[in-house]
């Protein structure tokens, strides 16, 4: 049983970890333990009873509460901040009972005076070694309560002040760089205020004691399942208490909790491992793969002409690309931006989601049929949340965009953002996208979002204006979810000018994420390494394009083969030998893609921290086969030989590794140094095969 309860203590156990909390002598719900699972329930430490000894160092701020209100004399980050109808701004939560349903623990806290109930939900995901947490607020009174902050979870680390925080940071064209930095006293804030997850930070964290690496060391890690404004407040108090607060961003957040209504926070997930960042990532990969809309379906190799043609698409030219693509072994042909009404540049058309009458006089059908006849699936690009002022949609409904009266409507990429919180906007998008999907044999949609929000107003809404941040995302999920339901066979990709919308929330709707608009081979290695901290390889769409075309096709193919492979180059310009190279690697990829997309990933040598050499390995779940990629970028000669030890093999079984002599035990391959001889900007891929069970 994963949930153990008594009247004062609660323990959640997963296969290898445990999380415990209980009521302390002051009656507060306090954190007790988070780490390796222990043999006996009585092994877990009791709820702490911190003793303050001065008015400034008082017990209230020393207590690691599971969900801290802003009552009493405590200055730690509260999990919740509300204003009651009479203006009182303090929330005082008291334990009021618990219930276990479907192996999920519901802890009820009630305000000591006001009609606010907070239910903390804890769900141990036993086989994934993760704890899922969220909170449900209920107003049982007859007046509204104004919510100002409602985090999903506060995660407490064991006492100590020597932690290191790892997170992902970047910007458009350069996302997902791994940052590892000591947590010092105070609060480190990571957040998005942009209405989407953002290219800049990601709602993911990993905390260790400063010495964990890919293979060993304790790591506490987690993420938020949300595609809008989010916040992580990593706090080290002056009393050696470290906690990660995670949830909706309270910046410009507001919600009117009306009488008899609930508010449910996004879900947060966190886990513990003693086996380093690699194990933490594999845990998240397994869990994310467990809920992807198309589960374990292998992704097809796609072609997309965006970087070759930009907006210049029409039936004849797309047919030409499709024919060459087919010859390379492509399985899915995707038409990107430029196909819809009035879209010749980025200044017009967004919002008018029907085929451009000049470019596609007979609709999309002739092209779709041609692609299908060639034996490929057809896919299409859309950017539903956006509108160009130069569009029929905007001319008819200028009030549908997010804006304030008396303020300019700032454009970015010459477009404005539709207010996805509005039911009429949702209905319009569902109607037009549904029509496209119904009338055409479309198997794949790339859902893009190419700007962030400014002037976040919703003039026609009579409720709390700041609800727009949450209601927008709910509207997005509603539109996407409805289309998914009506067209369950379609594979969807989440793109936001590259990796601006990469999060666990969107992966309930999208099967893949467009990792970055930067597609050049070398920098991409680090972007992909960062992405893989949280996301599995089957969600990482990676194209070979003409960026960094000084690199060989082989090098670029190897980089993109580490995820879900696509080609985005101008293949009409590829000479015969380049086409032959690409064809060869596409065939190899098809052969090994199940290992890459669905297997276990081991980052053997980091492109970001490891200099000009990097290597990554994927092993099938049954450890019978694997594949290792190695890359050398820019290292002056003379070089040291680059060597890696393989990972994830069955130590007792016998394996061969392509390019290396001999049949060796898994233990041997994992202990000896396997030397790669590569020149600058050379790469290699080696297959690992189990040949016998071993003696
Ligand atoms: C974004 C995407 C690109 C492409 C363009 C089209 O930048 O990330 O891949 O689809 O939009 O306008």
Image (cartoon, rainbow, N blue to C red):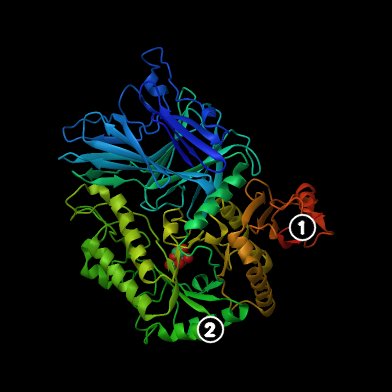
SS of the residue under disc 2: helix
Q: Residue at x 45, y 58 (%)?
A: 507
Residue nearer the viewer, 38 or 424: 38
Residue under the point 51% across and 59% down: 515
Image quarter hosting the C terminus: bottom right
Q: CA distance from mark 2 to mark 1?
A: 49 Å
Of pointers 2 and 1, the one earlier in the residue sequence: 2
Q: Residue drawn at (60%, 55%), measured in percent from left and top?
A: 523
Left or right: residue 659 compared with residue 398: right
Say above or below: 303 vs 636: below
Which mark is on residue 693?
1
Q: Secondary structure at mark 1?
A: loop
167 and 194: which is toward the camera: 167
Q: Which mark is residue 320?
A: 2
Q: Which of 452 and 205 lies nearest the eye of the viewer?
A: 205
Locate residue 134, reporting x and y percent: 38, 43
Asked where in the image residue 36 lies, by quadrant, the reply is: top right
Viewed as shown, does residue 269 lie left or right of 90? Answer: right
- Callout 1 environment at 10 Å: few (<14), some (14 to 19), or many (20+)? some
Q: Can you tell which mark lies on residue 567?
A: none
The nearer-to-camera label among 2 and 1 is 1
Report the image quarter containing ligand 1.
bottom left
Instruction: Report x, y in % for residue 433.
Output: 34, 72
| Image height of 636 relative to 510, above or below | above
x then y, percent, for residue 392: 26, 73
132 w.r.t. 53: above or below: below
């Amino acid at each position: 049983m994963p949930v153990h309860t008594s009247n004062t203590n609660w323990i959640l156990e997963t296969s290898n970890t445990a999380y415990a909390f209980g009521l302390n002598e002051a009656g507060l719900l306090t954190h007790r333990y988070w780490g390796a699972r222990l043999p006996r329930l009585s092994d877990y430490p009791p709820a702490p009873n911190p003793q303050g000894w001065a008015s400034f160092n008082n017990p209230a701020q020393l207590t690691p509460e599971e969900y801290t209100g802003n009552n009493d004399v405590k200055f730690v980050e509260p999990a919740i901040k509300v204003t009651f109808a009479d203006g009182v701004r303090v929330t005082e939560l008291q334990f009021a009972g618990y219930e276990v349903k479907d192996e999920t623990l519901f802890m009820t806290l009630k305000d000591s005076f006001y009609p606010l109930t907070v239910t903390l939900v804890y769900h141990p995901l036993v086989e994934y070694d993760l704890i899922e947490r969220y909170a449900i607020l209920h107003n049982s009174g007859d007046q509204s309560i104004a919510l100002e902050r409602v985090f999903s979870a506060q995660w407490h680390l064991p006492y100590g002040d020597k932690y290191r925080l790892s997170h992902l940071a970047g910007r458009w064209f350069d996302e997902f760089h791994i940052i590892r930095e000591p947590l010092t006293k105070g609060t480190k804030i990571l957040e998005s205020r942009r209405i989407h997850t953002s290219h800049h930070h990601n709602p993911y964290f990993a905390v260790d004691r400063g010495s964990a690496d890919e293979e060993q060391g304790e790591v506490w890690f987690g993420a938020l399942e949300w595609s809008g404004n989010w916040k992580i407040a990593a706090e080290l108090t002056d009393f050696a208490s470290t906690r990660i607060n995670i949830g909706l961003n309270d910046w410009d957040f507001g919600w009117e909790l009306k009488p008899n209504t609930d508010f449910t926070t996004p879900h947060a997930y966190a886990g513990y491992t003693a086996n380093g960042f690699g194990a933490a990532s594999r845990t998240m990969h397994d869990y994310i793969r467990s809920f992807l809309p198309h589960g374990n379906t292998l992704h097809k190799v796609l072609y997309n002409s965006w970087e070759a043609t930009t907006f210049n698409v029409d039936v004849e030219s797309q047919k030409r690309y499709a024919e060459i693509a087919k010859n390379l072994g492509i399985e899915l042909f995707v038409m990107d931006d430029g196909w819809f009404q009035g879209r010749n540049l980025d200044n017009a058309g967004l919002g008018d989601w029907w085929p451009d009458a000049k470019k596609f006089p007979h609709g999309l059908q002739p092209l779709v049929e041609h692609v299908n006849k060639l034996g490929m699936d057809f896919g299409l690009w859309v950017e539903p949340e956006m509108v160009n002022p130069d569009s029929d949609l905007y001319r008819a409904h200028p009030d549908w965009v997010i804006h304030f009266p008396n303020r300019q409507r700032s454009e970015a990429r010459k477009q404005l953002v539709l207010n996805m919180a509005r039911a009429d906007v949702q209905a319009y998008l569902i109607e037009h996208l549904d029509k496209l999907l119904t009338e055409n044999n479309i198997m794949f949609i790339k859902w893009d979002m190419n700007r962030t929000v400014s002037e976040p107003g919703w003039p026609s809404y009579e409720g709390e204006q700041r609800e727009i941040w949450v209601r927008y995302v709910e509207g997005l999920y509603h539109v996407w979810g409805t289309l998914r339901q009506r067209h369950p066979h379609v594979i969807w990709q989440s793109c936001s000018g590259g990796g601006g919308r990469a999060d666990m929330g969107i992966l309930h709707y999208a099967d893949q994420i467009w990792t970055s608009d930067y597609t050049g081979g070398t920098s991409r290695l680090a972007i992909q390494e960062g992405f893989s901290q949280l996301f599995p390889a089957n969600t990482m769409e990676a194209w070979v394009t003409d960026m960094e075309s000084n690199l060989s096709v082989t090098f670029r193919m190897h980089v993109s083969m580490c995820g879900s492979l696509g080609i985005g180059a101008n293949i009409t310009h590829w000479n015969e030998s380049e086409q032959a190279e690409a064809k060869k690697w596409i065939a190899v990829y098809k052969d090994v893609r199940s290992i890459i997309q669905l297997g276990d990933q081991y980052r053997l040598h980091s492109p970001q921290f490891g200099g000009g050499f990097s290597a990554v390995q994927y092993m099938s779940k049954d450890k019978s086969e694997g594949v290792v990629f190695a890359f050398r970028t820019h290292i002056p000669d003379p070089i040291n030989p680059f060597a890696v030890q393989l990972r994830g093999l069955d130590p007792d079984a016998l394996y061969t590794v392509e390019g290396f002599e001999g049949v060796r035990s898994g233990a041997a391959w994992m202990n000896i140094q396997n030397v790669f001889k590569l020149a600058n900007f050379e790469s290699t891929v080696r297959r690992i095969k189990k040949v016998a069970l071993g003696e």
